């Protein structure tokens, strides 16, 4: 479904991804965890091709690309297979919630306007924003904007939805509503890769956890096992710091 | 020559100038339409850092910003035919208006390109990424996401340019175009009431600018309607402002108290 092979990425002389291998099956929900600067966001941005990997091979659905020398067409087709939910939402500021969701359908996928409208209205209803169709992003709360962002990604019917720390920019009281929506679509069997700092959420929603540090995958495994019995010392260290109990024990 | 200002002449000239508004507006509209296209084309190489074209567009912009418009009018009026002659194109029968519009279009094009360049730079990078992420091509992302937002941002600057362009058309008279200013200079040849004529002319320019200003303001509001312009968000902001006002008011009181 999704296969990454030896993905490398450098910013200048600093290598942020040191040969990442990752496979994600259809319907899997993979959470990528790791300390800041471990390269997890860089990896996600490479998969969406917002960042160009220096080398490696990447396949999403039926599109396979050699990252050393991809053609413009390759990149465009690959981007068409994934959708992204951004940390800062990045809704189109000059468009209403409805127009945001419709945009990709109408402009990229050439779906007739009326059909695109119906589908978008349905999706916005699904994320609980049926009453906000004509609101501009500036009139929505962070949580609402992020839910529009999720609807916009869903509309494209991609092979995978990539979540880049979808709740990190939100007020704590708004995190819940966004996580609830992600939980809901995870249950529908949509393939997702989620970069997050919400440990409890990752444990609950992800079928598999990938732990990264310093540009490499340190450990991966089923969510239940990962949290109960991590194999690597580096992982244990990270989990100790991230779980609240440890904080209270100090 | 009359000894004092005769208001009746001001009125008379004002109405006799009205028919010339047409030619002035023709220069404004045509040159702005062409100028926008030119400005857009010139801004692109610098936005996308295209090697040679980027330099050319820089030279173009500095030239038209750095030389007086009046000189540009003459250079184009006398120079362009010579240049085209080299390409075996004869423009000696071309109406003067064509050269005038060309000059104004190139002039405003330089400024418009700068306005667009700055405004595009002001659009958040995340907006383009969001476009790419939903599968847009670079061109689609530019046209559907960046440009509409950039134009909204540039509107105040573009508005100034449009009004400046209107006033600058008064120089077209120097090539013999009978627009407003040209007309205003010929009207009083019999009466010698030049001051009254210029007064009427100034009034007319002012009214035109005023109308344009209002229209542009409306357009700006419309283009920026997505920035918390109405509904809940606007009242939220208003409420916040009122609250801040309260707070500062109280602050002033305590300061006064301290002073006393």
Image: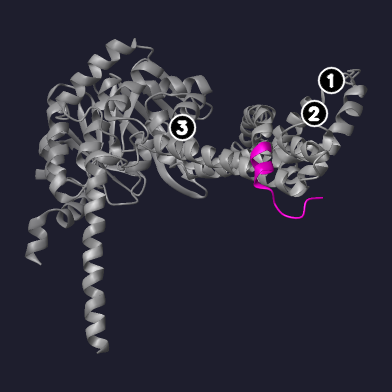
| Circle number at residue B148 | 3
| Circle number at residue B99 | 2
Residue B10 is drawn in which quadrant?
A: top right
Q: Which mark's residue is nearer the viewer, 3 or 2?
A: 2
Indicate the position of residue B249 as horizontal and vertical percent values.
24, 70
Tell me the residue that label 1 is attached to.
B94
Residue count near mark 3 (Cα–Cα under 10 Å), binned few <14, some 14–19, many ≥20: some
Q: Is residue B199 above or below residue B148?
A: below
Secondary structure state at the residue bearing disc 2 = helix
Q: Is residue B150 above or below residue A113?
A: below
Q: Which mark's residue is nearer the viewer, 1 or 3?
A: 1
What residue is drawn where x is 70% and y is 52%?
B5
Q: Which residues are magenta?
A: B1-12
Q: Mark 1 belongs to which subunit?
A: B
Q: Is residue A105 above or below residue B221?
A: above
The answer to whether marks 1 and 2 mark residues whose Cβ atoms lie closer than 8 Å is yes
Question: Does label 2 lie on the same chain as label 3?
Answer: yes
Residue count near mark 1 (Cα–Cα under 10 Å), binned few <14, some 14–19, many ≥20: few
Residue count near mark 2 (Cα–Cα under 10 Å), binned few <14, some 14–19, many ≥20: many
| Circle number at residue B108 | none
Tally of marks: 3
Q: Residue furthest bottom?
A: B260
Colour setup of the view: one colour
């Amino acid at each position: 479904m999704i296969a990454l092979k030896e993905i490398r990425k450098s910013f200048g002389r600093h290598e942020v991804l040191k040969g990442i291998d990752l496979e994600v099956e259809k319907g899997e929900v993979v959470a990528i965890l790791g300390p800041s600067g471990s390269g997890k966001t860089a990896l996600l941005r490479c998969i969406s091709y917002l960042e160009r990997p220096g080398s490696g091979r990447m396949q999403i659905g039926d599109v396979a690309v050699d990252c050393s020398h991809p053609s413009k067409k390759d990149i465009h087709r690959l981007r068409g297979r994934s959708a992204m939910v951004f940390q800062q939402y990045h809704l189109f500021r000059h468009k209403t919630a409805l127009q945001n969701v419709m945009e990709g359908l109408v402009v990229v996928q050439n779906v007739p306007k009326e059909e695109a409208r119906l589908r978008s209205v349905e999706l916005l209803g699904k994320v609980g924003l049926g009453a906000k169709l004509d609101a501009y992003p500036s009139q929505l709360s962070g949580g609402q904007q992020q839910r529009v962002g999720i609807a916009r990604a869903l509309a494209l019917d991609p092979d995978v939805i990539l979540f880049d720390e979808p709740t990190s920019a939100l007020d704590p009281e708004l995190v819940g509503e966004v996580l609830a929506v992600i939980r809901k679509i995870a249950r529908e069997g949509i393939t997702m890769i989620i970069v997050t700092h919400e440990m409890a959420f990752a444990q609950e929603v992800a079928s598999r956890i990938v732990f990264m540090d310093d540009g490499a995958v340190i450990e991966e495994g089923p969510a239940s096992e990962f949290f109960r019995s991590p194999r690597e010392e580096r992982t244990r260290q990270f989990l100790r710091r991230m779980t609240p109990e440890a904080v209270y024990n100090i | 020559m009359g000894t004092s200002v005769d208001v009746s002449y001001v009125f008379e000239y004002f109405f006799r100038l009205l028919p010339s508004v047409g030619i002035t507006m023709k220069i404004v509209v045509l040159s702005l339409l062409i100028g926008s296209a030119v400005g857009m084309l010139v801004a692109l190489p610098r936005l996308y850092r295209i090697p040679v074209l980027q330099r050319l567009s820089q030279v173009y912009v500095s030239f038209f910003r750095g030389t007086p418009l009046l000189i540009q009018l003459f250079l184009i009026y006398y120079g362009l035919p010579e240049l085209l002659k080299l390409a075996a194109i004869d423009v000696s029968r071309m109406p003067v208006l064509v050269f005038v519009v060309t000059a104004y279009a190139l002039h405003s094009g330089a400024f418009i390109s700068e306005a667009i360049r700055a405004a595009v730079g002001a659009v958040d990078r995340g907006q383009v990424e969001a476009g790419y992420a939903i599968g847009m091509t670079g061109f689609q992302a530019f046209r559907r996401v960046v440009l509409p937002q950039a134009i909204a941002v540039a509107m105040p600057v573009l508005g100034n340019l449009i009004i400046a362009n209107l006033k600058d058309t008064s120089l077209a008279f120097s090539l013999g175009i009978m627009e407003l200013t040209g007309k205003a200079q010929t009207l009083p040849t019999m009466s010698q009431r030049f001051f009254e004529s210029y007064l009427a002319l100034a009034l007319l320019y002012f009214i035109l600018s005023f109308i344009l200003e209002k229209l542009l303001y409306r357009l700006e509001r419309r283009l920026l309607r997505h920035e918390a312009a109405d509904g809940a968000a606007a009242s939220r902001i208003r409420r916040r402002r009122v609250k801040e006002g309260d707070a500062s008011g109280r602050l002033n009181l305590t300061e006064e108290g301290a002073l006393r």
